[in-house]
Amino acid sequence: MQGIDVALTYTGVKGNIALMRLKGFLDTTTSGEVTIKLRDILNNGIYRLVVDMSRVNYVSSAGWGVFVGEIRSIRENGGDLKIVQMTPDVYEVFEMLEFDRILDYYETIE
């Protein structure tokens, strides 16, 4: 069974942008860990997030649910969540499930 590694840094002029770098598989068994990290960020008053998925091999619907479940709260607090650098296989599922209508995606982290 594959796991997920979560690396977190803060960037921006004021250090108020969270950069979450994921590596591995984001599914039912690993989504809880990512949810905890995401909620820790939000509980610290950081509502501007970038999620780097360049090293994610697979995301299930439960994995996508981690981000979709928090996006309303993030936006209501004046922030946003941006997904960046998905692999082609992960992007295909993202688009097929129509999460591109809810979450913003960018090809590069810049």
Image (spheres, helix red, strand yellow):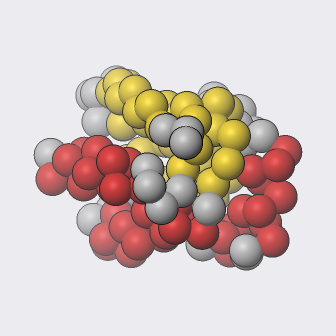
Give how far across and how far down residue 70 sits, in percent.
37, 67
Q: Quadrant of the C terminus?
A: top right
Q: Nearer the viewer, residue 54 or 1?
A: 1
User: Viewed as shown, does residue 43 lie left or right of 76?
Assistant: left
Give how far across and how far down residue 62 sits, in percent.
52, 67
Q: Quadrant of the N terminus?
A: top right
Give how far across and how far down residue 47 sits, in percent.
31, 52
User: Viewed as shown, does residue 82 lie left or right of 99?
Assistant: left
Q: Nearer the viewer, residue 62 or 51?
A: 62
Considering only vertical position in the picture, is 12 above or below 41? above
Identified at 20% across, 47% down, the residue is: 40
Considering only vertical position in the picture, is 102 above or below 83? below
Q: Is residue 52 visible?
A: no
Considering only vertical position in the picture, is 56 above or below 48? above
Identified at 27% across, 65% down, the residue is: 77
Question: Splitting the image into 4 quarters, where does residue 53 fall?
Answer: top right
Give how far across and how far down residue 23 sits, in percent.
55, 32
User: Viewed as shown, does residue 103 lie left or right of 58?
Assistant: left
